[in-house]
Image (spheres, rainbow, N blue to C red):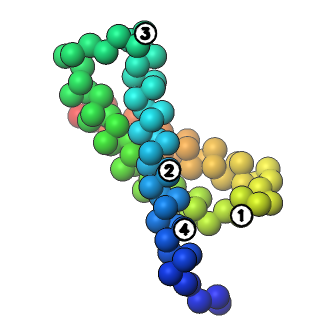
Amino acid sequence: MRKTTGSDQFTAWSLHVAHAGIFAAAMILAFLLRFDFKFPADEGNHLWTGVTLAVVVKVSVFFLLRIHRLGWRYAGVTDIVSILMANLWSSLVLTTCLFAL
């Protein structure tokens, strides 16, 4: 087994941060598209609750399904299927959480 270096840990951490940023941006953009880019003041609480929950759930599911360990240099169909499955599971968990609130 290969020993983990500080550089590898930094790369994994930075990948989680990048995923979180992408997920947050996607949620905010989807929210703005829903309201034709006219941000309603009374919906701000819903936006930030949804963004926070989406980032936590999606980063957690992507971590649990080890998406951060995929080899991006030689990505293939099986890697795409893994990403799609991780996105499907995280969306199901997120939808369940949002309806529970």
Percent x, y of residue 78: 76, 54
Labelled pair 4, 1 in contact (Cβ < 8 Å): no
Labelled pair 2, 3 in contact (Cβ < 8 Å): no
**Label 2 SS:** helix
Compare marks 4 and 1 and give the one earlier in the sequence: 4
Compare marks 2 and 1 and give the one earlier in the sequence: 2
Distance of mark 2 from mark 3, alpha carbons?
A: 25 Å
Percent x, y of residue 26: 48, 33
Query: On screen, 24 above or below 45?
Result: below
Residue occupying image coordinates x 56% and y 84%: 4
Percent x, y of residue 7: 54, 77
Percent x, y of residue 17: 44, 55
The quadrant of the picture occupied by the C terminus is top left
Residue occupying image coordinates x 67% and y 62%: 70
- Say which of 99 and 5 sits in front: 5
Instruction: Inspect the image, locate mark 2, and give the three-letter code of the amino acid beneath it.
Output: His
Label 4 vs label 1, nearer the camera: 4
Distance of mark 3 from mark 4, alpha carbons?
A: 37 Å
Residue holding disc 2? 19
Instruction: Inspect the image, locate mark 4, and give the three-letter code of the amino acid beneath it.
Output: Thr
The single residue placed furthest to the front in the displayed view is: 7
Residue holding disc 1? 71
Residue holding disc 3? 36
